[in-house]
Every structure is written in C-alpha cells, then in structure tokens.
Amino acid sequence: MKLSNIETIPGKNITKFYGMVSGSTVRAKHIGRDLMAGLKNIVGGELVGYSELLQESREEAMKRMVAQANEIGANAIVNIRFSTSSVAQGAAELYCYGTAVTVE
Amino acid sequence: MWQLGITLSLMAIGYYFGRAAENKHFKSIRKREKKYRNLPAVTFKSLPPEQPKPTDSKLVIGSTVVSIDYFKRFLGMIGNIFGGNLSSYESLIDRGRRESLLRMKKAAKDADMIINIRIETSMIGQSANQKGSVGSIEVLAYGTAVKF
C-alpha cells in the first residue's frame, strides 16, 4: 500500500478513484504514565510516555485506514490528512483520512 | 504558609532543571539540524520542476509531546495580565516543532526530498479542556518522502 499526502503518488499514474477512507482511535492514558507526566510537568520538556502513546495510536488509526482501502481493492491512498482532538479529559482521538486510488 | 513554600520550591525546581533541560535539548536540535541540512524538506504540493522522475515515495511522520515547566507556567500567568509576547511559550512550541521535523526527517531515511510538509499543533493532557492554559502540546509533522 502506497501512502502520500499529496494529490498523486510521485512517479505513478492514478487509474481509478474509489473515494474516501478513514481510520480513527480514541486512546486514554495509562495511569502510571499519567502520574509520570504529572511529575514531568514540573520540569517541563518532552513527555516521552505521551509521545509514544500518540505514535502507537496514530499507527493504529492508519492501520484501520489501510485495511479499509484494502477491502475496496485500492493499492494506494493519496492526500492523507491527520487530525487530533481531545474528546474527554485524558483521552485523545486520532483521526486520519485520505482518498483510496489505484495506481499503475 | 507551607503551601506557598511548596509552590516556591516547585518553581525553583522548574526554573533550574527546566532551563538546563531546555538548553540541552536546543543544543541537540541544532546538532541534528546540521546533520540533515542536505535533505531538502519543502512545503510545495508537487515536485519542483527539472527533477528526475521519482522511483519511490512514502509518507513520513514525526511527532512530539512537550510540556512547559512550572516556572514558565507562572511567567505565562503573569504575562497574561499584561499581555504582549509570551516568550516562555514561544520557546516551548519552537522546541516541539523542530523536534517533530527532525523526527520526520529521521523517518525518511535515504530519501532525497520531502515534499508537502504539514505541521499541526494540538493541545492534549489534563489542562487541555481548561480555558486559557497550555499544559502540554503535541506537534505533528508529516510529508511525502521522495526518492529519485
């Protein structure tokens, strides 16, 4: 599966469009990580636990998007966009969407 | 009275350790930025003209969550009263953005160019839903890495 965030796959021609595919996850933080992040908030800097958590969830969201594209028979997703929103206290929603296409 | 003592000591800890950590981080960012200087990363939507035909491409992502320290948060609160530049927050966001861009470039490995870079910032964490406070921010940078 080829992914890109521009309108085409560089060097390839799009032969067929299928429509939008998307994937999302809502993740809550681990209580241990939350505690560590609270402590880290005093000195500031990178919150490694959160960085990893969001990265994992984003990968999961992308996996769902790719699965959807596979199901309809596409072999690439173009114009992918990401968005993050905080839906509840301590939980974040990661959403990604794009257009499923076939390239030659 | 002892509550004030705790607040003051937290601020002192935040000031000393936070500043040391920030300087160290900026030093490492500058070092790595030098390393990736010959990888062009642009915000064009398509390849610039007069480039060879690309053979491979992939989506690359880099993200960071950074948080502000206790002392700077206090400075921010004071700054909110008088308005103007909040330089303590500026350095926080700058740090996050540059780190994310570096991670994205690291993910690109042996690519020759990254096009259509987009940067997104969002607030997460406990204070995300409280009005007027930035606790921790997440910066996401993504683009399409192209190999000629």
Image (cartoon, coloured by chain):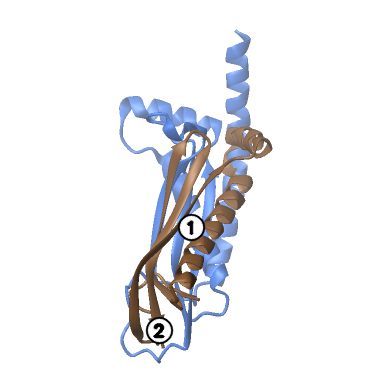
Amino acid, disc 2: Val
Q: Position of residue A61 (x, y in %)?
A: 51, 57
- Residue B87 in view in this figure: yes
Q: Are marks 2 and 1 on the same chain?
A: no
Q: Residue at x 44, y 41 (%)?
A: A86
Q: Residue at x 48, y 70 (%)?
A: A71
Spatial CA distance of label 2 from label 1 is 34 Å
Is disc 1 surrounded by few (<14), some (14 to 19) or many (20+) residues within 10 Å? some
Report the chain shown in blue. B
Of A103 and B93, which appears nearest the observer?
A103
Q: Chain of mark 1?
A: B
Q: Residue at x 47, y 35 (%)?
A: A88
Q: Position of residue B109 (x, y in %)?
A: 57, 75
Q: Which mark is residue B98?
A: 1
A18 relative position to B17: left or right: left
Residue mark closest to the camera, 2 vs 1: 2
Q: Is residue A58 above or below residue A70?
A: above
Q: Chain of mark 2?
A: A
Q: Which mark is residue A103?
A: 2
B87 relative position to B22: left or right: left
Outermost residue toward the right in this view:
A32
Amino acid, disc 1: Arg
Q: Position of residue A104 (x, y in %)?
A: 41, 88
| Secondary structure of residue under mark 1 | helix
Report the chain shown in brown. A
Of B35 and A28, which appears nearest the observer?
A28
Q: Position of residue B100 (x, y in %)?
A: 50, 58
Q: Is residue B130 above or below residue A50?
A: above
